[in-house]
Amino acid sequence: MANLLWLQGGACSGNTMSFLNAEEPSACDLVTDFGINVLWHPSLGMELGDNLQQMLKDCISGSIKLDIFVFEGTVVNAPNGTGEWNRFAGRPMKEWVRELSNVADIVVAIGDCATWGGIPATAPNPSDSEGLQFLKRDHGGFLGKDFKAKIGLPVINIPGCPAHPDWVTQILVAVATGHAGDLAIDEFQRPKTFFQSFTQTGCTRNMHFAYKVSATEFGQRRGCLFYDLGCRGPMTHSPCNRILWNRQSSKTRAGMPCLGCTEPEFPFFDLAPGTVFKTQTVMGVPKDLPAGVDKKGYIKLTAAAKTAAPAWAEEDIFTV
Amino acid sequence: MTDSSIKTSQAANDESLRDQLRALLKDGLETEVEPRAYTHEQVLDIVARLQQLEESNLEEKLKTAGFTLTPYRHEDDEQACETCMYYQLHRKFCELPELMLPAEPQWSCRLWRI
């Protein structure tokens, strides 16, 4: 039996909503099949008031063993570093987070806000928010770059806005069943099993990407969303087109550009007007190129592919 | 109508319109070839101007977008319609929603993007 505690900081509850929709395994499966004991969760916890406060204190003192500490949302430091803007169970949330992280065997950050600050940490970051071990791309965050949970692992980051339900439950099962050490993580402490490939991997528009045929409107079935509509699929690490959402689809499959929400810089360009859903270009070339591609190579490849594109690539082949 | 007859009719319309555009450019229509839309703000500005135009106002569309009959050159790059993201090579058609014009592969405009 692994004790799991889930708290929320500066959050919209989106990751909780996502988690509750998990299917493989489901949130219930975690309890019934994988021996996870949910000590408390903002939407599921039974304890209130003094009882909850006492449970948190018992976790910190060690009288309740804390195996997995899950945090959703940012660590709020405002005002003036006190964290008073986000109080919970009688004190600033950040104080609970610090003490619980120090006693937990494993700490898991769920969603962009907990991993790197996400939307709340976007400039000018009025709540002085940060992620558990990152602030955007900067390693450190609230717990500091040298933080390691009791079993010796740094915070395991499962980003996304929200994170896909199955990324959450599959990682929780892995750590609850003693396989945390088997998780290969990348430089941003994301499990590689989910975040090594690109959002583009498995996208149904890949042939349009290859032949450089652009979609010019949302919802169009023909055309790639990267060239004009700001899709970040070729440079975003996520399995959104391998592990589908609701087992059905993904943003790009539905004609909606990837926003790059699993990357530390999300939301990109600090949401400046005109930067969302529009590919930013410099002298006609996208500012952000597919991962690993340089500008010269991109221009050569694109020109060649465009002129070699077959006629069908310009047509809508997905007839209903 | 079958797909092929629709395509034939569309091709004929495109060809006729393309001829009109070619004639306008050959007759010396002065277009805004420069400044090129090299920044995001410039792109937005030109697109906003195009959005104000009547769909049938071909002359102003050509002027505002800065069309030329030959590719614009910048350093080593040639900015021809045929390599532009908005261009359908087989139909020979610019699909930028604000333009939607038949164009030759070797034409060029300042909204070129690759």
Image (spheres, rainbow, N blue to C red):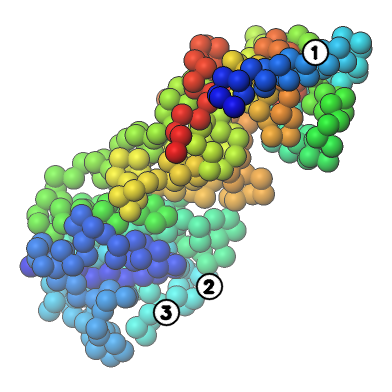
- Residue type, mark 1 in image: Asp
Q: Give the number of the disc on residue B19.
A: 1
Q: Residue at x 60, y 35 (%)?
A: A216
Of marks 1 and 3, the one in the foreground? 1
**Residue sitting nearer the eye, A123 or A95:** A123
Q: Position of residue B83 (x, y in %)?
A: 61, 16
The residue nearer to you, when weighing A202 against A87, is A202
Say whether residue A186 is visible.
Answer: no
* Quarter assignment of residue A2: bottom left
Q: Where residue B35 sits in the image (x, y, percent)? A: 81, 25
| Residue assigned mark 2 | A79
**Mark 1: which secondary structure?**
helix
What's the CA distance linking mark 2 and mark 1?
A: 67 Å
Q: Is residue A200 left or right of residue B52?
A: left
Q: Residues within 10 Å of mark 2 (few under 14, many from 20)?
A: few
The Cα–Cα distance between marks 2 and 3, rounded to whole angstroms, is 12 Å
Chain letter of disc 1 in the image: B
* Mark 3, residue position: A87
Q: Secondary structure at mark 3?
A: strand
Host chain of mark 3: A
Mark 2 and mark 3 lie on one chain; the one further toward the N terminus is 2
Q: Amino acid at mark 2?
A: Pro
Quarter of the image for the C terminus of chain A: give it: top left
* Same subunit, tags 2 and 3: yes
Q: Is residue A283 left or right of residue B59?
A: left
Q: Residue visible at 44% across and 33% down?
A: A318
